[in-house]
Image (cartoon, rainbow, N blue to C red):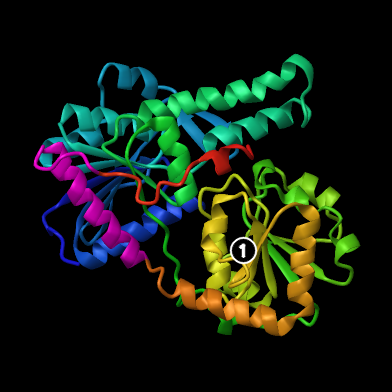
Amino acid sequence: MVFRVDMRIAIFTDSYYEVNGVARTYQNIAKSAMKKKVKLDIFTMGGQPIKKHGSVRIYAVPPRVPFEYYPGLIFDVAAIPRHLVGWLPSVVRTQFDKKNYDIVQVATPGQMGLYALTAAKKYDVALVGSYHTHVPFYSEVRLAKLLGGKPWGPLKIIPILGREFVWWYERYFYGRAIFNFAPTNMIAGSIWERFRRPTRIMRRGVDTKRFRPDAAKKAKRPTVLYLSRLAVEKNVDMLVGFHKYLPGVRLVIVGDGPDKKRLQKVLPEAEFKGFITGSELEETYASSHVFIFPSITETYGNVVQEAMASGLPVVLDSRGASSELVKDRVDGYHYIGKGDMYNRLAKLLNEPERAKKMGLAGRKEMETRTWDNVFDSAMESYEKAIKVHENKEPDRVKVRAPVSSTRAQKHH
């Protein structure tokens, strides 16, 4: 695909240097832009100096009044009054004064998102959004936990009100975009109902050279792997009682997070390996037999793709958006409820040839999901948004696969 090499793109994201799905997405987008010599500037939080990588520049904006609203996540309170008066940080203002940006992408609805809205309006640049995290549902789950897990009586309404407030706040961001990127069809339907803006699918890529079956040192015992952040919204409690259902099977849990200590108490049979990287991570994936992913609040699930690229069949909840990554009975299983989950796991562990066949099918599918393909698709969408903004083309950008969000929302 051939693009305008002179297109100038500005992406605003609250997360770039951290270890999470959003940061990894834009790190990989930056690599593809550099490879294709596309001019991309990324504005993010922090105090790092300007980073230059070929045609890509990374600019960091230090927070003035930081507020840690979740472990490792900060919101700059000063961004709100700044946005209301149309003020921009000097690093943002300087670049927008010097460069004639064609497109602004708001990736996260925090302080950098506020600056993206201000800059796009002030400099009359086409604006698109990108929805990554189900913050409304995360807030509902976390508020419920603060109230004891299952609030009753008048307290029941508090988590719901928290969720709806976050939806209202996000509508302020994403409702101004020409269109919004969504990672899956289920999420596309969900945010279209909330924001009433056109939606396009932008999936994620996976590094199949890094995550591969031949990195394995197979464990002697059958091994089920869970790998993700350890937080209440990840639904890891589905694994409580693991040895009762699957005696003799090894459960490995990789990751860290605010819920780790509690999970260690309720899952004494599990091996908690903490946060790992590099060859140890690749080997841990490939050396397992089945990957389990119980989260239903995920918007995508990069770890699911990494597991599939490593040759593992995946078992996950049919209600989550991540279920779109796995073809049921082809490269894994969708389950409904705890009993069904353990039945699916047992079937794969007891039938190694079936598990191997599914793992190979998943690996083959992942070989088509490159970050360069993701970037090419995004560039095509940028071209559409620019033409709409310049009134050279009517606003006909629609949800590519208009899946109703009823399925997604009725479970939350």
Q: Residue at x 62, y 24 (%)?
A: 160
For mark 1, does the 10 Å Cα neighbourhood hold few (<14), some (14 to 19), or many (20 or more) residues? some
**Kind of element beneath mark 1:** loop
Residue 349 makes an appearance in the image: yes
Residue 129 at x, y = what percent?
Answer: 33, 40
Quadrant of the drawing holding the N terminus: bottom left
Which quadrant holds the C terminus? top right
Residue 271 in view: no
Using residue 298 as the reference point, say whether residue 355 is left or right of it. Answer: right
Residue drawn at x 54%, y 78% is 361
Query: Viewed as shown, does residue 361 lie left or right of 368?
Result: right
Q: Which residues are magenta?
A: 371-396
Q: Main secondary structure of the magenta part?
A: helix
Residue 104: quarter of image: top left
Whether residue 162 sits left or right of residue 253 in the image: it is left
317 in relation to 367, above or below: above
Relative placement, left or right, of 96 versus 190 is: left
Residue, x 32% and y 47% (percent of image)?
Answer: 49
